[in-house]
Image (cartoon, helix red, strand yellow):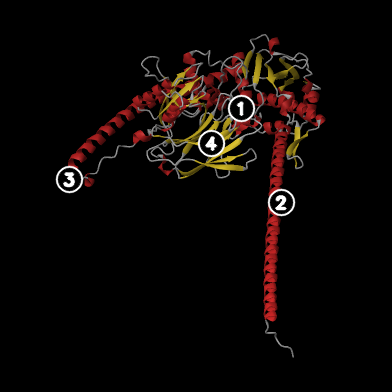
Amino acid sequence: MGRRSGGLIGIWAEQQRIAQRQREGQQQAVLRQQRDAEGVQRAYERDVARVQKEQKAAYRRHRDDDALRRTRELDARVAVLEGLLAEGCRARAFSVDTLRQAEEVEPFAPGPLGVPVAMPDQRYYQERGGRARFERDWYAAQAADARRLEQLAAYRREYDLWAAGRLAEIRRHNDGLGGAADALRAGEPDTVVEYFSAVLFASTAWPEGFPREVAAAYDRAGRTFVLDWDLPGYEVVPAAKGIKYLPSTDQDKEVPRPVTQRRALYRDVLAQSVLLAVRELFAADRAGALESVALNGYVGGVDPATGLAGRVCVASVVVGRRDFDRLNLELVGAVECLTGALAGRLSAKPEERISVAPLRTPDQVGSEVVVQGDGEEPDLLAMDPIAFEGLVAELFRARGLQAVTTRRSNDGGVDVEALDSDPISGGSIVVQVKRYRNTVPPTAVRDLYGTVQDAGANKGVLVTTSKFGPGSYTFANGKPLTLISGTELVDLLHQHGLRGRLGPGTAPAPVPVEPAAAAAPAEAAEDFNLLGMVWSGSVALDVCALVCSGSRVLGDEWFVFFNNHSTPDGSVVMVASTSGDRAAVRVGFDALPARADRLVLVAAVDPEVNPDADLRGFSDAGIRLRDDAGTELDRLEVSDGRPGETALVLGSFRRRAGGNWDFVLGGKGYRGGLEELVGDFGIQVD
């Protein structure tokens, strides 16, 4: 049996053993912590890898789906081309009755003018001095209602005058249709050409983008309609057969359509178009004016041999009604039918502009050739002023409004009076027309606002052939004013089937793009930053940017805001906000002009959304600075808003020596809104 040593050495040895066990325990604890941390790290890395894998898979699925969608769009376009003739044969035939208009006009809709002014209730004026206040408010309400009744009566007179004129116009039109039917039966050449040209223009069988221009003459003796009809170019058949996503390069690749397939389809489309046009003409001939049709199909474009624009005949046919009526167009092969059964001509290589000789041309008929369709557009800048005002009035009528031009004298600065019959948003509209070549000054917009107030109108519209500066847009913001620039006017005309251009050779205005799409110019820069705005509060704000030299903006076009989404060089662009931002601006700092040393960001209350709001609810605001890959680099804090202020300088990026940019916090507020703020930076508002 052993015993525990009680000497000093034994005690010391026991202490050493205890200390050793403590060190070992500590080491084990450290090792366990290391193993636990390594386990957590491995789990985190596995989760990250899994998330990245899922994100990569989701991204690839998105790109694959997008490629599939675009491929299906190509297939749908080809299906429309392949079924052009069969689908067109199912369309309803045109007739003279199609042109008949119902003898009715939009009912009178007074809008807000039809609502009486509420009279004060005496029960709420019981306190001391209440009777005097009641009488004052009652007389004021009576006066306001009397003014309303006066405006309502004037509005009614204006409507009655317009309605009577409109009904008379409809009746004259309908009465003329009876004469047109008689003239068709009698074979009057002018009426025949006009009617059958309208047949082709009114047809719904032609896909979007197909040309519609005709030069025609009528051979009365032979009852033959002879016409030159424009056909689509080779580009109507998509060059791509499909879209394929390549994950290795993260790019979409167009799968080319086989050349032989594309050429065959284009030739078939031309043959279908010729047969369909002939079918439309015969089907609309209820008066028996046509015994035969001679049609020559032309395509436009640039001649590769000369480099000059021109038209070549690629198809021609002369066909009698009896021969054509025997065909089952929904089942024929278009090329075989045109060149075989009808003995027509079709270019063997229309894509190379190889022409055929026309069988009979309108010039050979002997009567006057009439040209109609997508030819020369009238120049708005050279148009007679009265005709120009009439065109603007026609545009408003095409948009469903009642509109008339005013008398030349005592019109109070109003060129067109319009009436919107919508019971909620409608009312009277005064329109001013300015045929300018230079930028419309803000004073013209102020004058329009005064005219709107003097006339008691609900809205004012200023239409010009030129453009407006930021000062004009800033003044109009929040007021019942609409500004239509020259390019917007041309686009609206084309959208509603009207014609017009700005200057010689001016192409139709491009379709407006969304702010996000308008960002394309900035992508030309090698590097850009995204400035995303965030803030708390429900107030609606307009975020704007000014490219300045010192405290002055470089020019009106360097003020980027809700009506000017990009600087001229695309270095600053308003874009759609993402990732939780409430507004966003894309900036290529290196692409800014050398004379620019500041990019100033400002915010202002949107008076149309929150007319009575100020910036007291604008708080927790910041600018998220991201690189071109979307990675957040920094968050720049900006000042909170203050009661009574409606516009605020958030801050400015300033160019320092060496070309670097840094951010300087703003904070200056304005009670006069964006109009007062931009005035400080040299934007002319009045």
Instruction: Give the spatial CA distance, label 2 vs label 4.
Output: 38 Å
- The amino acid type found where label 2 is placed reads Lys
Q: Residues within 10 Å of mark 4 (few under 14, many from 20)?
A: some
Label 4 residue SS: strand
- The amino acid type found where label 4 is placed reads Phe
As drawn, the label of residue 128 is: 3
As drawn, the label of residue 94 is: 1
Q: Residue 509: give x, y in percent of width and height.
A: 58, 24
Label 3 residue SS: loop
Instruction: Give the spatial CA distance, label 3 vs label 1.
Output: 77 Å
Instruction: Give the spatial CA distance, label 3 vs label 4.
Output: 59 Å
Quadrant of the image containing the C terminus: top left
According to the image, label 2 marks what residue?
Answer: 53
Q: Residue 116: give x, y in percent of width and height.
A: 31, 37
**Residue shown at 69%/13% (left/top)?**
362
Q: Earlier in the sequence, mark 2 or mark 4?
A: 2
As drawn, the label of residue 519 is: none
Instruction: Give the spatial CA distance, label 3 vs label 2.
Output: 77 Å
- The amino acid type found where label 3 is placed reads Arg
- The amino acid type found where label 1 is placed reads Phe
Q: Residues within 10 Å of mark 1 (few under 14, many from 20)?
A: many
Quadrant of the image containing the N terminus: bottom right
Instruction: Give the spatial CA distance, label 4 vs label 1.
Output: 67 Å
Question: Looking at the image, which is closer to me, 603 or 76?
Answer: 603
Q: Is residue 526 above or below residue 212?
A: below
Q: Earlier in the sequence, mark 3 or mark 2?
A: 2
For the image, the number of numbered tags is 4
Labelled pair 3, 4 in contact (Cβ < 8 Å):
no
Q: Earlier in the sequence, mark 2 or mark 1?
A: 2
Q: Earlier in the sequence, mark 4 or mark 1?
A: 1
Of the two numbered discs 4 and 1 in the rendering, the one whose residue sits closer to the viewer: 4
